[in-house]
Image (tube, grey):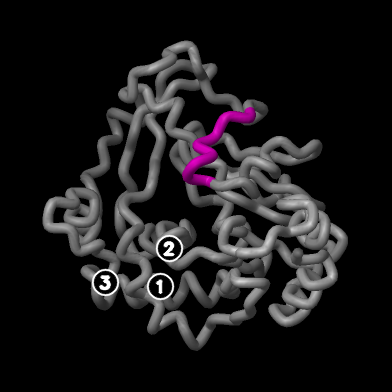
Amino acid sequence: MITRRELGRAFDALRLSEVDLCIHSSMGSFGEQLERGPEDLVETLLARGCTIMVPTFSSCFLAESGGDETAVFHPECKDLSVEKMGILSSYILQAPGRIRGNHPLNSFAALGPHAEELVNGQTPRDVYDPFRQLCNRDGFVLLAGVSLDRATIVHYAEQLAGRRLFVRRARTAEGTIPAAVGGCSRGFNQLAPVLEPLRRAVAVGQSKWSCFRTQDMVAVCKETIQNNPYITHCGAPLCSRCSEAVKGGPPVDEFLWNS
């Protein structure tokens, strides 16, 4: 059984106190159970003055996906793709006082003293504003038991490197609208060698953690992508998203955004 004291020691080793951080996690990676599940992780960080941000993506609002067409997104709703997002994201989305960004497909939710500053600027078109704010606030990304292919911040680095984002249509309380989203992330592990000098590492039970300062991580990923666009390609010959991304992304359709 992993205790809060052990979690505290891990956060001490990573120098995570009174900071804002985005967490991508696999609770199953610990091997041993946390004493109180995701509550232990969240409460330990909140007690240290941290603000926690997590991805709360949901595909159920895709307009082209069929299914329940009465389901519409609004920031107060609690729907997410839990099988992809994980238990921690679900826990924070249910937590009192959490703030959820205004993006119907790729929202982020935050909990803690700076939650509003991190996610309130997210819009359907400006999907990665939470990472812009995290960088401005000198925050961190924590990969707890997952690898770089789960690090959504790399999509923000792609955007800064000049790549155009993809656009899907989603159902919201205002109707069906376009929403910007990232592409394929299965090739992001190829960035591991260039990010290794920035990585802070610790183990919690069987869970291997990697932590990165966002400003440094984004700068290195941006420069690497500009110098070698193919580095993010997942390697699948038929992956159209990767093929478009390495060419700069899909063309911008301003009519779609203004319609």
Q: Which residue is mark 3?
A: 231
Which portion, as a residue range, is magenta?
78-85
Residue 135 falls left or right of residue 232: right
Closer to viewer: mark 3 or mark 1: 3
| The quarter of the displayed image where residue 154 is located | bottom left
Give residue 154's mark.
2
Residue at 60% in and 71% down: 206
Marks 3 and 1 sit apart, C-alpha to C-alpha, by: 10 Å
Q: Eyeballing the image, is 184 above or below 149?
A: above
Report helix, strand or loop for mark 1. Answer: helix
**Image coords of residue 124 (percent x, y):** 47, 36
Q: The residue under label 2 is which amino acid type? A: Val
Q: The residue under label 3 is which amino acid type? A: Ile
Q: Mark 1: few, some, or many residues within 10 Å (few <14, many ≥20)?
A: many
Report helix, strand or loop for mark 3. Answer: helix
Between 200 and 222, which is closer to the camera in this rendering?
200
Between 92 and 242, which is closer to the camera in this rendering?
92
Q: Tell me the quadrant of the picture where the C terminus can be found.
A: top left
Residue 28 falls left or right of residue 17: left
**Image coords of residue 1 (percent x, y):** 76, 64
Marks 1 and 2 sit apart, C-alpha to C-alpha, by: 7 Å
**Image coords of residue 241 (percent x, y):** 23, 50
CB contact under 8 Å: marks 2 and 3: no
Residue at 45% in and 16% down: 175
